[in-house]
Each structure stands twice: as C-alpha cells, then as structure tokens.
Image: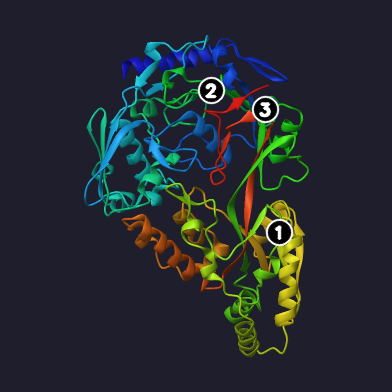
Amino acid sequence: MERLEKNVKKRKILALTACAAIAVGGITACGGNDEDKRGSGAGHMYGAALASNPQSLDPQFAGDPSSATVIKNLYSGLVVKDSSGSIVCCNAKEYSVSEDGCVYTFDLRDDNYWFFDTNEDDAIDDDEKFPVTANDYVFAFRRLLDPKMHSPYAADFKCIKNSQRVSEGGYATTALGVEALDDYKLQITLEYPCAEFLGLLTTPAAFPCNEEFFISTKGRYGLDDRSVMSNGPFYVRQWFYDPYGNNNILYMRKNTANERDDYEVLPTFVSFSIQDNEAGVKQAFKEDEAECFTAMKVGGYNPKKYSIIGQKATTLGLIFNPKDKLYSNKELCKAVAYAADRGSLKGELDSDLQVAYGVIPPAVDILGRSYRDLASDKQFDMFDREKAVESLAKAKEELKISSVESVKIIVDSGTVDSRYLHLFSQSWQDILGIYIGIEDLTSKEFNERIENGDYSIALYPLKADFNSGLAVFDEFGENECLKSAEGGLKSTESIMQCPSVNKLVDSYAAAERALLEQYGFIPLFYKSSYIVAKKDNEDIIYDPFTGSVDYRVAKNYS
C-alpha cells in the first residue's frame, strides 16, 4: 500500500509537467522496439476517434461505446472470446468446473500485471507494476454486486452464490461466492449450473479491480487519467477533455508489462481524438486522422478502397404504442403480425438486411456458433392470411369500428433504409385492406418520438448490450416501449439455470416464442453493424453489441 500511495503522488506531480507532444494532426510518439515486427504489420501508431468523451473507465459501471472501446484496450479478464467466438483462457492459465457445474476454480497467471504510469519517458519500471492476484477479482465482484454501487451489470451475475441477497443488502459483500484460495487461485461458486457463466466472464464487468488503488483514487476511479491502472494491452498516458475546447484526446501506449508470447500487443500506441458525435468520427476518418469508424449505415464507401465488415447484431421489429386508440388492441397487432409476408422479400434485400422471424439476431453466438445456426428462426414463421383476416375482424368488433384508418410506421433513417419496408406495406394493404405508410425521421427525432410516446407503430432497433441471448431478453424488461411483449417472458431465471448448451438453446427458443406470442414486437429484419477501415489495416476487432473497438492485434501495412 505504501509503495502504491507513493507512486500515486508521484504521478500526480508528473502529470502536471508531462511531455506529450500534441499537434493538430495528433500525437507524436517516441521509442518502441517494433521495427522487427513491421513485416507483420505491427508497430503502427494508430489514429482513432471516439464519438464522445468516455463517461467512465470503470469496467464495473461504464456502458457507453466510447468508454467500452477504451476499457477493452485498457483491461483484460480471466477468459476472452477468440476470433472464432470460442472462449479461451487469458489471465487464467487454466480452470476446472466441478461435477455439479457449480464451482469454477481458476489458476491465474503470475505474469499479468497492473501498470501504473509515473514516468515521463514511458518506460515501465519494476516499481510501477504490481501482480494481478485473485484478490483483485474478488474485490471486483464485490463492487459489482454491492447495492451501493448501482452497477447496471449486477443482475447479469445473479447466478453467483448469495448474489441476490448481497445485491438486496441482506448479506455483506463478503458472503458472495467468490473467494481467493491463495494469490493465484480464484474460486467462484454458483447458485446453480449456468451454461452462460463463462460468456459472462468475458465481459468488462468481470475485469479485475485493485482495492488499494481504488481506495487511493478517493472516489475518482475511472474518471481521469490519474485514476486508472492497466492490466491489459495498453495504458492511458493522457486523457484531456474540455467540452468547450478543441484537441480533446485520449492517448494510450502499449503496455509492455503484459506482452507475452501468447498475448502480443501489436500497435505502439492508439491516439483517440474525442469528437462530439458520430459525424465527427466520420469526418476524422475522411481527413485521415482515424484509421476506422463504426456505423449502422455505410453507403458511399467503396469496398474496393475500404475494408467493410458487418455483423447482424440488431433485430428490427415493429412495436405498437400501448396508448394508441387502435394499436393498443392486441387483435389488431396480431393481424399485422400474421399478414407480414416475409416471403415476398426473397431476393429483394441487399447484404445489409436479412429477413427476421425470431427475436435474437445472428451475431449472438453460443460457444463460437451463431445461435441462429443452432435454432433456425423459420420455426417462428407466423404468416397466415386466414388468421390475419380473422384477427382483423375481431379487432374491429372489439374497437367497434367498421374500418381501420391509415397509419405510418416511424423509422430511424440513420439506422436503416426504409425502402424494403414498402414491400411489407403492400402485403398489409392486400391482405388487410389497411394502408400502413412510412415516416422517415432523423435518429434524434425518432428517439424523441419513442420517448414521448408520439407514434402508433415504430420500426424499433433491438440490440443487446453484450453478446448474449439473455441480454437480448433483458431489453424487454428495461425499455418501456418493449414491455407490451415482456408479459410472455415470465422470467429469465430458468434460462440462467440451463446446465448445458443444448438446454440453453431450447430455453432461448422457448423464450423467443413466448415473446412473439404477445405480438408486441414483430421482427422483420436482422440489421448489420459495421466497422470501416482503410485497406492497409487488418484485425481491428469490433464488438457490435458494446460498440467497442479492440486494437490489440491490429495490423497496418502502410
């Protein structure tokens, strides 16, 4: 503790006089021994851009995409998803699971370090790095489940023993089923077998947190460049943000303390300019100040000139305003659902969209395989002309009307091109005799209309905040506009308790069906999210759920 406190004070003094060469074009870095790796595209000094100032670099709390990107490059956890989506060890050397599936024991590496920068010359001295131990994971989970913290991720870990009582304040955090058996052996005990648990451990909420350092920040943890400590591929050298100024930056250097044969860090540094919005990020990319950007729409970018990779992580579906005089009627919603002829779109869609019958999009994977490959969504096809007409007749009777007046679906034009929605409009007109038009809005207008309840029908983009079917289902409980469908999903507790992948797949499918049978969310399309990079870049990894961009193994051949 004494050594750490001394380094904290040292860094606070040095931060006032730190020499970071800031220019209009970015930051000039010195040093680095990556010339011998240039043939493999390593050693590049990446220019990047964030759409906003990170809200926090606290993994147990932060959730915005800018924070997620920096956190992904700042920390590392017990396990990680590799490029195929399989879960492999990272800071754990190995792990074992008890026969009943409830006790996970992790043997930690002894060469993963916390690095706390106190030097001007960016050298990593022995007195600036501290071993990451099992106690750092214990403290992280106790923080996560502490009710005083109000972590948005606490509910995701309700499978851990005593987590419910701890999060409700009934038990002290020390009662949580997470224990350090020694400095490098961590044991986590669950309330029940959970096939999702290893996937949860790959998320930032499960990253370690050093208690001594956390206390030393005096409530500033994750809020400035003197209140973060890295155990991952990069460390924060400088973070400057003035909401009224220019040249706002967050500058990260390679953390050589944690580079090893099986965990290379290829770029020398990543320098983020902090923009005001996504348009600012695209402008930085256009002006060659950023190597890549992420977006929901990428029209106008030539795939011969740029690397464009998309993942279908969003499900676009119709939602109905529960206070609307007509579409609050369930039979009318059912009529629209039964009359949605997805078959009419065969061969019409471009690669950006895919016809959707289910709730969970194809980018959600289970142990490296797309859930949609394991459970085809065709089982949820509800197109039925006769049922559509029957439901419409019941709706008219219940509403005491002779005809249904025309209505418009509001669409976020910043998310999707609405032209394909017209094909559905035609089937509704032909089968139901109802004209359902389309009203394109800006993202800001769309979000305001949803928040104010100023719509009858909306094409709503459903996306989870991490790669999990459970996270998709959680959206129905968290978003007011989706709660009309939530009634079909009694609880996700049974899904959490699935002991095997096969049972997990079956439980996901049952939950999808239960939601769809409420007719409050009618899936129409799976939509891609994209990362666009200059052609001389490879292996910049984008997570479309959290919005994070991972530069650890990024290569540049320019």
Say which element carries label 2.
loop
**Where 178 sits versus 538, above or below?**
below
Asked where in the image residue 115 lies, by quadrant, the reply is: top left
Q: Which mark is residue 292?
A: none
What distance separates the C-alpha of mark 3 from that of mark 2?
Answer: 15 Å
Residue occupying the point 65% across, 85% down: 389
The earlier-in-sequence mark between 1 and 3 is: 1
Q: Which residue is mark 3?
A: 536
Examine the rendered structure and indicate whether residue 343 appears above or below residue 224.
Answer: below
Image location (x, y in percent) of residue 480: 55, 62
Q: CA distance from mark 2 to mark 1?
A: 38 Å
Q: Is residue 338 visible?
A: yes
Placement of the N terminus among the 4 image quadrants? top left
Residue 468 point in image, percent of width and height: 46, 52
31 to 131, vertically: above or below = above
What distance separates the C-alpha of mark 1 from that of mark 3?
30 Å
Residue at the disc numbered 1 = 349
Where is residue 34 drawn, in percent x and y?
Answer: 55, 14
Proximity of marks 3 and 2: CB atoms separated by less than 8 Å = no
